[in-house]
Image (cartoon, rainbow, N blue to C red):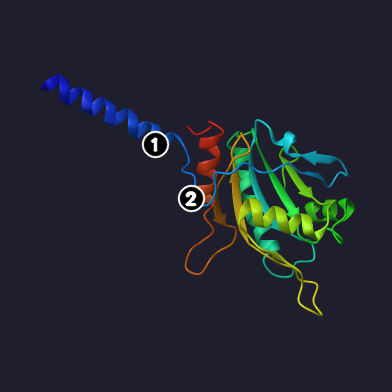
Amino acid sequence: MKKVLFLMLSVSFIITACSKSDVEVMSRYGNTIEEFSVTDQNDETFTEKDMEDKVWLVDFIFTNCATVCPPMTMNMTSVVNKLNEDGVTDFGVMSFSVDPETDSPEVLTEYKSYYDIPEDVEWKFLTGYDYDFIRHLAEKNFKTIVAPPPKGSNQVTHGTAFYLIDKNGKIIKDYSGVDNGNASFPEAEIIKDVKILTKSEE
């Protein structure tokens, strides 16, 4: 009886340990990001193949955004700096512009310069595609909206979430990219999840 009890406790411990070692995939995700070819702020081509062997955080922004994008980018910058300070190296960030006609590589480079982003962190500000591409990418892969500006405005409608992608290109979960009602920006959760997926959590 004692042997059976010991075995059950051992199995329970193993299951618990395994459950804590992975980040649970949200039910609406689990898909692998589709093939794409875009241009980064350095005017260099970036594709899904360049994502290999890294964990990625993804968001959708644009440089003329007058509301949510600056705090989103500030929050992402804070996450990046803390991961960098903790010695996490095998991760990157992809910020897809939802206004690619305005956001040339030069404009994105200037936008990036406004933020305290560590030089050794791979943060790709992406453009080089049309509106149909970014709307399709957002809706099909990340289950979020990208919609053209209302008449007389230059403010594109888009989601404010951050997305987590594992080293196999699988979309795992999302987080609010800004304070949301009574809930604060979940910085600690994002950092913990990235560390788990990069096997860097102590």
Instruction: From the image, state whether disc 1 or disc 2 is nearer to you.
Output: 2
> Which amino acid, mark 1?
Ser
Element under disc 2: loop
Crowding around mark 1 (Cα neighbors within 10 Å: few <14, some 14 to 19, many 20+) is few
Residue occupying the point 63% across, 59% down: 144
Q: Position of residue 184 (x, y in %)?
A: 51, 61
Q: Is residue 112 left or right of residue 143?
A: right
> Earlier along the polypeptide chain: callout 1 or callout 2?
1
Along the line of sight, which residue is nearer the eye, 9 or 119? 9
Along the line of sight, which residue is nearer the eye, 157 or 131? 131
Element under disc 1: helix
> Which amino acid, mark 2?
Ser
| Mark 1, residue position | 19
Residue occupying the point 56% across, 33% down: 198
Displayed quadrant of residue 90: top right
Residue 132 in sight in this render:
yes
Q: Distance from label 1 to label 2 (Cα)?
A: 16 Å
| Mark 2, residue position | 27
Q: Quadrant of the N terminus?
A: top left
Residue 115 in sight in this render:
no
Q: Residue furthest bottom?
A: 152
Q: Is residue 201 above or below residue 148?
A: above
Displayed quadrant of residue 5: top left
Q: Is residue 164 above or below residue 63?
A: above
Kindly identify which numbered label has been placed on residue 93: none
Along the line of sight, which residue is nearer the eye, 137 or 182? 137
Residue occupying the point 34% across, 32% down: 15
Residue occupying the point 68% across, 55% down: 138
